[in-house]
């Protein structure tokens, strides 16, 4: 098991390095950060001065290794835009994103897994069709639109929850539903498909023949096997939610890390973008690693892989 | 209200999960305002955004104050001033003014602030706001001299705009970063909290001096950044916001019909124009020919753009400056909409079937598309290339842009030098490279005689229009939407002035 984890970890680090290098090159190519920092009023001299001050006149590889060397010592530099240490900035914004991501994935799992199980128990029944409808709707609906509908109903019409901000748990209700709903369909359908496959297998028949209760068959025997791909999927979804909740964070004015990333890209704020990309890729890596471990625990056959 | 909604609300009340009644409004004497953009640093020398100017006007004071309606200069932290010679301005300071931290305002504060921001090594972001100042020196406790880098007649405009005075001891101790997190000034409002980029709260300064800005009347101002305009509107509807601004015109049209809010509109100094590479910096281009540039000018239906797209109080613009700016003479040749004449001019220039070119832009794609379609009517086919602002500016400086839809806001500086001299004085952004214009602007920018300045700006602007170096098109406008409890008249400089807002 330890060898398995170490191997995965080594691979993960290589992935993180590659991601950071590619993102650095892309940003480097996308426009001169000096012009962006100098602002609308600057002339060529100002831009040149800034270029030299920040070291943008050095070769790209030198700049990259400089950044990497500092990053290894947890020094992510200063944000060009906020003029604050990037580490502080991200620490300040990450909390909101983590809370939202965890709440959303929990919401998605709590709703989608039972729904998937129920749908698999009675294929083609009304409840199965309802679940299918929910999942199609969830995938088809753009999240900004869904968010605005929820705001207009629950915040403006009914006045039940605030429309924007992040100061209390009530501020997270709508964003959680919107973001979670987006992740739900895939989890639900994977659970349903997995359950259908497992339920028709021999050992389930054996379990039923033994006289095991339907609940025990479903949750002890079937779900444990059906859920393996769901775990992997949920890990990817989780990574996506931590990095990709830009739209939701922006609509609900949550000022999380996703929104910060988006804003920083449009402002050419290289140190912030680089650090965020590193953080986000770390999330993916940690979550897929966790998923691998959970799966290895669920299914001993995978430990050999 | 529908009975069903009431029922849900009652249930919600029992469950204890209703939204706390928003503490907006008159009753709590708190004005809730939304910003769209995250303000990078409250220290006004270290941000370049409009939100920053709004904060600056509330927290700090300048030496001079310009009436936003008339442009007339009045003393603020200084009471009188005079030019001792072409590059020395002597100012008498107001006595008895205190900073929010209780320290006294004296000549030392002016000297420290000016010397700090004027030194390029300290990295003030908007260099052009400060780089005209060389240094400041103290004559006595309430008299200072500001030395300029050469004659600079627009000095008063800058001293009443972007240059505000910071407390010397405090600024020396905390620097721009500390000032941004915990600002201290002499202004009508003092800052009670800063959550960088996200949330700012202000409170009335009860000891505010007898400033021409007037006495503030609203007790507290609570500013939150909400990037999405639809969410801002939702907050306005449910009482979480009292005022939002920069609202798109299609949204305000619907809000106006509801009759629940006041919708105010004012033109801004931002001018939209087409820039053409007359000097041929980008290589062999049709725009080197006068007839082609005139044809472009005749091809644009400015009235249609203003009436259908920009709306509000936007104006048609014919000059390379905004009409209210000092020296922005309006008696220049104009090019009324005339597609037939445009085609004729193109034929004369050797393009009877028109031509194809790239049109660069960085904002308002729908305007760029409308302009492109008007140009295609006369045979000019454009490939629209929308870039990030910094990427386009980069190409501009290298002289690689033949044709661009650009805008310029002059930083709300009410002087023609903030626009025409930025683009026609032979710098790296000058695509005309017209010796005569460069010379005229040189005189206009440095003369201390206002009449002479007017004369030479008029000469330069006339030449720019005659040669059709640009096709100036329209001014932008801003929509302000606020509750009927609030009274406010917006100004053309696009700055929210909390000090001039009152509850009805």
Image (tube, coloured by chain):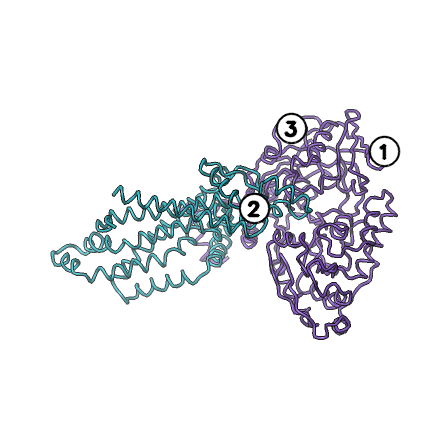
Displayed quadrant of residue B137? top right
Where is residue B470? Give x, y as percent: 74, 60
Q: Is residue B1 visible?
A: yes
Q: As rendered, which of A137 and B7 lies closer to the eye?
A: A137
Which color has been applied to chain B in this rendered view?
A: purple
Disc nearer the start of the sequence (1/3) = 1
Q: Name the outermost residue toward the top.
A: B140
Q: Which residue is mark 1?
A: B84
- Kindly state the secondary structure of the residue where label 2 is placed: strand
Q: Which label is found at residue B225?
A: 2
- Please report, as a chain letter, where disc 1 is located: B
Q: As rendered, which of B65 and A213 lies closer to the eye?
A: B65
Q: Say how many tags the image has.
A: 3
Q: Which residue is mark 3?
A: B172
Residues at marks 2 and 3, CA–CA distance in whole angstroms: 29 Å
Displayed quadrant of residue B96? top right
Which color has been applied to chain A in this rendered view?
A: cyan
- Please report, as a chain letter, where disc 3 is located: B
Camera-near label (2 vs 1) is 1
Q: Give the vertical position of A92 relative to B11 (above or below).
A: above
Mark 1 Cα shell of 10 Å, populated few (<14), some (14-19), many (≥20): few
Mark 3 Cα shell of 10 Å, populated few (<14), some (14-19), many (≥20): some
Mark 2 Cα shell of 10 Å, populated few (<14), some (14-19), many (≥20): many
Residue at position x 13%, y 58% in the image: A206
- Please report, as a chain letter, where disc 2 is located: B
Q: Is residue B489 visible?
A: no
Asked whether disc 2 touches disc 1, contact meaning CB atoms under 8 Å apart, the reply is no
Where is residue B153? Give x, y as percent: 81, 42
Where is residue B9? Give x, y as percent: 45, 51
């Amino acid at each position: 098991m330890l060898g398995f984890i170490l191997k995965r970890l080594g691979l993960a680090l290589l992935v993180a390095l590659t991601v950071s290098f590619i993102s650095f090159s892309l940003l480097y190519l996308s426009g001169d950060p000096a012009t962006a920092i100098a602002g609308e009023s600057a002339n060529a001299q100002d831009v040149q001065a800034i270029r030299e001050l920040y070291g943008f006149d050095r070769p790209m590889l030198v700049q990259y290794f400089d950044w990497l060397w500092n990053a290894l010592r947890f020094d992510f530099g200063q944000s060009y835009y906020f003029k604050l240490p990037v580490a502080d900035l991200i620490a300040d914004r990450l909390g909101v994103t983590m809370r939202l991501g965890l709440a959303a994935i929990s919401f998605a799992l709590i709703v989608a897994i039972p729904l998937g199980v129920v749908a698999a128990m009675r294929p083609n029944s009304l409840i199965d069709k309802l679940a299918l409808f929910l999942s199609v709707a969830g995938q088809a609906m753009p999240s900004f639109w869904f968010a605005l509908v929820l705001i207009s109903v629950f915040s403006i019409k009914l006045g039940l929850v605030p429309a924007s901000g992040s100061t209390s748990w009530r501020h997270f209700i709508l964003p959680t539903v919107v973001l979670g709903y987006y992740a739900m369909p895939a989890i639900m359908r994977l659970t349903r498909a997995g359950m259908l496959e497992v339920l028709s297998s021999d050992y389930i028949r054996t379990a039923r023949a033994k006289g095991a209760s339907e609940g025990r068959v479903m949750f002890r025997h079937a779900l444990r096997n059906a859920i393996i791909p769901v775990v992997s999927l949920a890990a990817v979804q989780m990574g996506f939610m931590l990095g990709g909740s830009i739209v939701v964070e922006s609509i609900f004015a949550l000022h999380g890390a996703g929104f910060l990333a988006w804003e920083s890209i449009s402002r050419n704020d290289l140190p912030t973008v680089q650090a965020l990309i590193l953080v986000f890729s770390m999330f993916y890596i940690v979550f897929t690693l966790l998923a691998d471990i959970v799966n290895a625990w669920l299914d001993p056959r995978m430990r050999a892989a | 209200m529908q009975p069903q909604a009431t029922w849900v609300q009652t249930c919600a009340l029992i469950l204890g999960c209703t939204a706390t009644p928003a503490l907006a409004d008159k009753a709590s004497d708190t004005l809730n305002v939304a910003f769209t953009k995250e303000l990078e640093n409250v220290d006004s020398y270290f941000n370049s955004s409009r939100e920053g100017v709004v904060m600056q006007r509330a927290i700090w004071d300048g030496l001079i104050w310009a009436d936003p309606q008339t442009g007339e200069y009045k003393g603020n932290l200084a009471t009188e001033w005079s030019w001792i010679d072409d590059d020395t301005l002597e100012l008498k300071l107001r006595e008895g003014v205190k900073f929010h931290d209780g320290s006294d305002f004296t000549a030392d504060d002016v000297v420290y602030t000016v010397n700090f921001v004027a030194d390029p090594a300290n990295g003030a972001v908007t260099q052009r706001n400060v780089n005209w100042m060389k240094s400041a020196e103290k004559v006595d406790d309430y008299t200072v001299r500001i030395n300029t880098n050469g004659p600079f007649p627009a000095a008063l405009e800058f001293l009443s705009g972007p240059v505000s005075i910071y407390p010397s001891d405090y600024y020396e101790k905390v620097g721009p970063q500390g000032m941004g997190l915990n600002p201290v000034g002499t202004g009508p409002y003092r800052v009670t909290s800063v959550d960088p980029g996200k949330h700012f709260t202000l409170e009335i300064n009860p000891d505010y001096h007898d400033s021409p800005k007037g006495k503030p009347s609203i007790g507290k101002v609570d500013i939150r950044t909400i990037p999405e305009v639809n969410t801002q509107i939702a907050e306005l509807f449910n009482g979480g916001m009292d005022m939002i601004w920069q609202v798109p015109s299609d949204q305000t049209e619907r809000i106006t019909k509801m009759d629940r809010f006041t919708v105010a509109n004012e033109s801004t100094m931002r001018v939209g124009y087409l820039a053409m590479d007359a000097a041929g910096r980008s290589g062999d281009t049709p725009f080197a020919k006068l007839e082609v540039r005139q044809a472009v000018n005749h091809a644009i239906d400015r009235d249609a753009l203003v009436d259908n797209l920009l709306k509000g109080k936007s104006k048609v613009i014919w000059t390379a400056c905004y009409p209210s700016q000092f020296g922005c003479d309006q008696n220049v040749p104009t090019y009324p909409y005339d597609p037939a004449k445009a085609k004729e001019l193109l034929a004369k220039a050797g393009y009877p079937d028109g031509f194809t070119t790239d049109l660069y832009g960085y904002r308002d794609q729908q305007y760029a598309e409308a302009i492109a379609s008007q140009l295609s009517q006369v045979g000019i086919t454009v490939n629209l290339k929308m870039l990030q602002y910094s990427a386009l500016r980069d190409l501009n400086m290298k002289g690689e842009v033949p044709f661009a839809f650009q805008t310029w806001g002059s930083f709300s500086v009410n002087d023609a030098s903030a626009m025409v001299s930025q683009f026609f004085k032979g710098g790296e952004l000058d695509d005309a490279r017209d010796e005569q214009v460069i010379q005229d602007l040189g005189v206009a920018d440095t003369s201390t005689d206002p009449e002479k300045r007017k004369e030479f700006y008029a000469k330069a602007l006339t030449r720019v229009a005659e040669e059709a170096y640009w096709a100036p098109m329209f001014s932008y406008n801003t929509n302000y939407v606020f509750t009927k409890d609030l009274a406010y008249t917006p100004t053309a400089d696009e700055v929210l002035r909390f000090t001039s807002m009152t509850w009805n």
